[in-house]
Every structure is written in C-alpha cells, then in structure tokens.
Amino acid sequence: MSSAVSDTSVRTAVIGLGSMGCGMALSLHRAGLSVVGYDVDPAGVARFAAEGGQGASSPAEAAAGAAIVVCVVVNAAQTEAVLFGEGGVAAAMPEGAVFVSCATMDPAVARRLAARLEGTGRHYLDAPISGGAQRAADGALTILASGSGAAFARARPALDAMAATLYELGDAPGQGAAFKMINQLLAGVHIAAASEAMAFAARQGLDLKRVYEVITASAGNSWMFENRMTRVLTGDYAARSAVDIFVKDLGIVQDMARAQTFPVPVAAAALQMFLMASAAGMGRDDDSSVARLYAQVTGTALP
C-alpha cells in the first residue's frame, strides 16, 4: 500500500458511496484527508458518516471548497450528470481543483468531458479503477490514470491513499479509459470462457472441485477462472461484480471497435453470453452467473 498523507487541509469529496466508493472514501479518511461523501442513496451517506466521515446532501455541497473530487459512479452518463447536471460539481469546485473520474467509459466520452471541465479552469484526471471492493477498502486499488501534470499533482494525495499501484499512462484524458477497456475486454472473455468450461465439465459428470484443482494448476487457468469459479462451486451468486457491468463494458468495446472498423469477434461472443444471462433475469447477480445460463440452456446441474 502506498504511503499515506496526513494533510488534513486537503478537502476531498467522494461522489458515489457504493461498495467501491465507500471503501475509497474510508481509505482517504484513514489517510488523514478531510473527506465529504455523497450518494443518491442516503444509506450510503449514513454508512460513511458512521465510520467517521462527513456526509453531504448533494454533489455540489460535497464539492464546495474541495481540492479533489473523486467520482465513483457506474458509467459515463452518471459521470456527466455529476459534473454538469442539476446540482453538479463543476460549478461548485474551486478553480484549480481536480475531478478524478473513476467510471469505466468510452475514451472519446472521457476526452469530451475533460475538455468541457478544463475549459472552466478545473482539472480532469481520467482514472478508472480495478481491484474490487475489498481492495478499495484496503486502499490497495490499481488505478489506470491519464491527464495533465497539473491534474496528477493536484490529485496525488488522494491517489496515494487509494492505490497500491498507480499507472500514469499519458498526459491526455482518454488514455486511462482506453487501457481499462482492454482490461475489460479480456476480463469479460475470460469469465465467459471459464463459465463455459465449468458448465461443460459438469455436463461430462466431472467432479467440479477436482476440475477447479486441476485447471488452476494447469496452462488453461486464468485469474478470472481462479477467482470466479469458486462461486460456481459453492452456488453463491451474490453480486460482487454484476452481469450487467459486463453488458455495459463489452458493449463499449463493441462501440469502440465498430467506430474504428476493427473486428472483435471473441469479445462479441462473450457480450452475447452476458446479454443472455441478463435477459434471463440474472443482470444484477454475480457475473459468474454466465455458468448458470449455460446450465439452464443445456439442462446441466451445477451446485
């Protein structure tokens, strides 16, 4: 974990206090920053306040006077609403403050949002995150960031508190987003492939615990197989990362590829599996539910 800072004069706002955002806000709070949090769900604000943070009743209230505004929402549309919608943060942030955008989005949208905000005298750091809720709570995320030197310098206290690994990927917003989409392409394909393999193994009548043991020690293993298939073994599909996240992210990959006339047939096939799982009512369940879809379609029993 990166060394913490202790400058309590660095007022920081966190917009979005879900499973990731709350952990990030608490990491900032532990590092000694003055943290104000906002979420559309009052329960999220209450949870953060119960841990010693300060709550706000709107994004603008949270961002008022903040040197750093960290936005941890689901997608580009929500990010744009946080910035420029009614009660948005762009007008409330002091000039020279930095907006740290953590949502996964099309790089072209990140560039557009950055240009609009930077035109007002504020900074924009394109900073998608990876690592999950536990690493967010531990201040041990991986952050894939790009932006101006001034944006990095202003955001540094928050980046140090939230990340174990920070990749500085360029001086222009959009580059961090592009790196994240390459990761999401691979992650989605690996989950879909792991789900297909595990359901196929079940159809062969194999002991799935032994399948897991063998594959995780063999060349066919992937991080996603090792991580997600434990959930299939236990039949626990409570969402850590939902099916609909990959419907969104692989959809962005398709949009990017189509715009550049670049074929991505494997990612397209994976997207269809996530779409089918979502259509079957599993959209808010764990993304390993793709294995359940295979089981339903083929009449195969899983734990």
Image: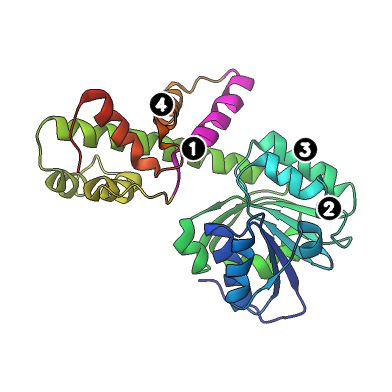
Which segment did they paint magenta? 241-261
Secondary structure category for the residue under label 3? helix
Specify the label residue 276 is tagged with.
4
Q: Do the residues labelled 3 and 4 touch (CB within 8 Å)?
A: no
Secondary structure category for the residue under label 1? helix
Q: Do the residues labelled 4 and 2 touch (CB within 8 Å)?
A: no
Estimate the x, y position of residue 254 in percent, counting from the top left: 55, 25
Few, some or many residues within 10 Å of mark 4 (<14, 14–19, 20+) = some
- Circle 2 sits on which residue? 90
Residue 58: quadrant of the picture: bottom right
Q: Does 37 sit above or below residue 112? A: below
Secondary structure category for the residue under label 2? loop
Quick one: label 3 or label 2, which is nearer the N terminus?
2
Closer to the observer: label 4 or label 2?
A: 4
Few, some or many residues within 10 Å of mark 1 (<14, 14–19, 20+) = many
| Residue 250 covered by magenta stretch | yes
